[in-house]
Amino acid sequence: MSFSLDRFFRHSGTRFRLFAQSPVLDDFRAPEVVHVSSPKGSLGPGPSDDRMYALSPIDKKPYGAEDLPPFRGPKELPALPDLEGHFDHLHPGDRGFEAAHMFGTVRRVLDVWEVYLGGPLHWHFAMTHPRLELIPHVAWDNAHFGWGFMECGEGADDQGEKRPYALNFDVLAHETGHGIVFSLVGVPTPETLTTAYRGFHESASDCVAMLSVLHFESFIAHVLRVSEGDLYKANELNRIGELSATRQIRSASNALKMADVVSLDTPPAELTGKQAHTLGQPLTGAIFDIIVDLYLDRLVAFGLVQPALAQGLRRAAAASEEALDAADDRALTDAYRSEPEGFRDALRDARDMVGLRLAATFHRLQPAGLTFARVAETFLAVDRGFSGSTNQALIEDCFRWRQIRREPDAAPGRPRETMARRSALV
């Protein structure tokens, strides 16, 4: 059931060079050529089209609450397409590469989610700003998405070198995720804004990034190679927004439960940005857990591993790291080495199963009265529509372990904590 964006758009789309992950990582130092859905020859200087445009100010402060696009100050010359309308002639270090990379990445993420949604996404700010303004560099150690704009600063790596967030796929995909969620779920009024909505927004944006990067075939191959097919091990899939080989902005396979984060009763105006990001972590962790469980189930369905092996992995993860190593390493590694493409197919299927369900969940939610439990209930309802009762117990348990859904009396738990603690050591 999985699909390939590059196969979809290879003949009709526009080429860009994109980093699948931050170029601070050794295995991702070179960008790769991808095809986005923009018809060949349709993009103007910037790049630009009728939905968004990139520009590079010569000197600009980050947008504030009362400061909105369009930017009217001095700016560098725009990136230009080649004679065929492509932008892959631009390489790192070339003038205009960061602007082209930012535009191409946002378009790539939109391509992923518009396939999941079954149609185009319309910006929530279109009533006043018909196009999204993309600014690849401002003097700021952050990146943000606002009313009609997305702009990026830069952050230091372990050696103190400044790394532009405009070249970090996860950061750009996360910010695009904010636009997707605002456009699908809606924008709350000051009266209906809740702390849960703020935490959900950060989690949903991380999930957009996590699923979007899995549409790079090189990334799928890398994750499975370094983990030897065992996604319980630490790998780049669960590291969101890498700043170095050992640091990231957040971890998807975290050990956090709702009891570990700020109370949902906290007034939203009192919630700090850091608290909002942390609040979303249990929900992000639940979605990561669901991806891994569906991946294991696909391996079983493909006949690549025995059901007892998948169950053994889960039981061992519940016991200890030593038990997990002893129980799964050789068996799963042998299976992966024998049929790596089957493992890639299983991960692609798990990716698209979760992506389709999340997109439909976003469509059904509303900002007023949003709770984490309602997100879980909606996800479960969407899954029933797709596959009946097949995945319900698996999904229910992932949410329950995170305390997003109430634990029924005497309900058996599934192995979560060891997996999360193991991955979070990266």
Image (cartoon, rainbow, N blue to C red):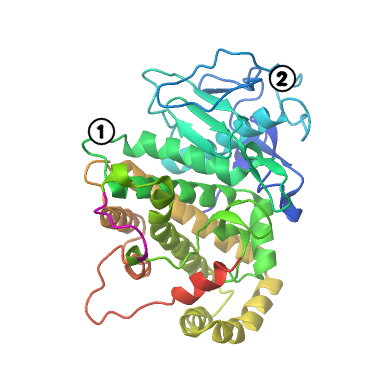
Q: Secondary structure at mark 1?
A: loop
Q: Are marks 1 and 2 in contact (CB under 8 Å)?
A: no
Quarter of the image for the C terminus: give it. Answer: bottom right
Query: Which residue is more in the foreground, 253 or 289?
Result: 253
Which residue is denoted by mark 2 in the rendering? 80
Kind of residue at disc 1: Thr
Magenta residues (range) = 260-266
Q: Check disc 2 and report its element: helix, strand or loop.
A: loop
Q: Position of residue 294 (x, y in %)?
A: 47, 65
Asked if residue 84 is positioned above or below residue 161 in the image, the reply reads above
Q: Is residue 339 visible?
A: yes
Distance of label 1 from label 2 (alpha carbons): 40 Å
Give me the residue at 62% from left, 40% from top. 165
Badge 1 density bin: few <14, some 14–19, many ≥20, Cα 10 Å: few
- Residue 82 position, x and y percent, is 76, 21
Instruction: State which quadrant residue 391 falls in.
Output: bottom left
- Whichever of labels 1 and 2 marks the residue nearer the N terminus, that label is 2
Tell me if residue 264 is in the magenta stretch.
yes
The answer to whether residue 203 of the structure is visible from this angle is: no
Residue highlighted by disc 1: 189
Magenta segment main secondary structure? loop
Residue at point 47% right, 34% down? 145
On the image, the x and y values in percent for residue 347 come to: 56, 61
